Amino acid sequence: PTLMLVCCSLLLGTIPRLLITVKSTNMRCKYQVHNNRSPQRSFCHVAGKDENDPKVMFGDIAVYTGLQSADPCTARGCLWPKSSDGNVYVAYRISNQYSQRERNTIVQGLRSFSRSTCIRFTPRRRQRDFVDIQSRSGCFSFVGRRGNGQVVSLSRRGCVFQSVIQHELLHALGFNHEQTRSDRDQHVRILLQNVIRGQEHNFRRIRNSRNLGTPYDYNSVMHYGRFAFSSNRQPTIVPVPNPNVAIGRANQMSPTDILRVNRLYAFVQSSIGMNWDCTCNPNWPAFQNVSSLCSKKFDLIIRQ
């Protein structure tokens, strides 16, 4: 049977690359590996390879089929709950599919959040909701907390690197890709004529995205690369007004990525609505930007 390939080539570094071609009867998919080291975060998800894999949109965002919204965060609360100590504890389970080295890399990626945000990934014990990290057919995650065990796929073939781990976990925390922001057309131009036919949906703009009062970030670990889903080796995303700006090259979360996590999780839900909770650690990077917003209404920030 024909396999449908969903490829997400997010170009990162400048290390020499080995091109690997995966063929199907529908399309040709190329992704790049840095001399068997760190990939240019190039995901090639084989939809349908595993019948248990969810449907994947936007390159690596998993969605449930049926009546559920493709982006549950716009329809209902999908944040992980905050503890009384001001931290957000997210339970995780790592599959035994990984080698000890791969497991250590994943754990390091999980722990990287605690160095700059209130997010604390902790091994699952009896928690009902948790991220279930498995090596499936590609790199993908649901957006936000879905309830119970939700799969975060980090394939052993090309996904076990810090930038990819952070990218997929940011999805699980509630974040979409940078180039889907409501204001993206002011910062990038999408060249659909160069996109693989049938993959145009990966470049949809989210009209009501939650930008959290932060600027568009070309350096975000959530940004696609210049040649993502290209059918002809021509760019699919070009920055404006300066077309030479580097995009999709982040090796780790940018300061703006960190700021957004802290802003999104710097409030608590009370009986009177959404209010800022300013108990965050002042030693965090960009904390002052969060603190300055504490007196403002959440809705004024979340929709900027």
Image: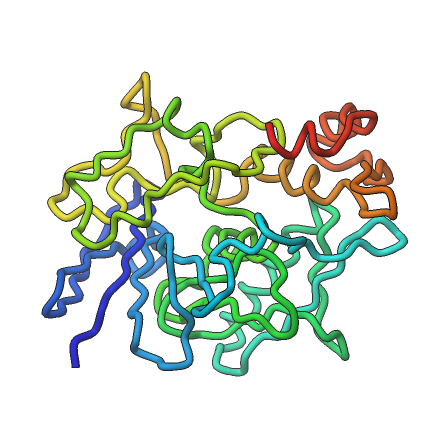
Q: Is residue 225 left or right of residue 232?
A: right
The quarter in which the C terminus is drawn is top right
Question: Is residue 151 something one can see in this rendering?
Answer: yes
Residue 232 location, quadrant: top left
77 lies above or below 64: above
Residue found at x 44% / y 58%: 61
Residue shown at 84%/36% (left/top)? 278
Residue in the foreground of this view, choosing between 284 and 200:
200
Q: Position of residue 261 (x, y in %)?
A: 65, 43
Considering depth in this image, is 250 or 43 the residue closer to the camera? 43
Please state which of residues 245 and 45 is positioned toward the viewer in this rendering.
45
Q: Is residue 110 left or right of residue 82?
A: left
Where residue 259 sits: x, y (%)?
64, 35
Residue situated in front as seen by the camera: 94 or 37: 94
Q: Is residue 201 above or below residue 303?
A: below
Q: Residue furthest front?
A: 67
Quadrant in the picture for residue 255: top right
Residue at the image position 13 percent from the left and 69 percent from the top: 24
On screen, 86 above or below 185? below
**Which residue shows up at 22% across the image and 68% down it?**
4
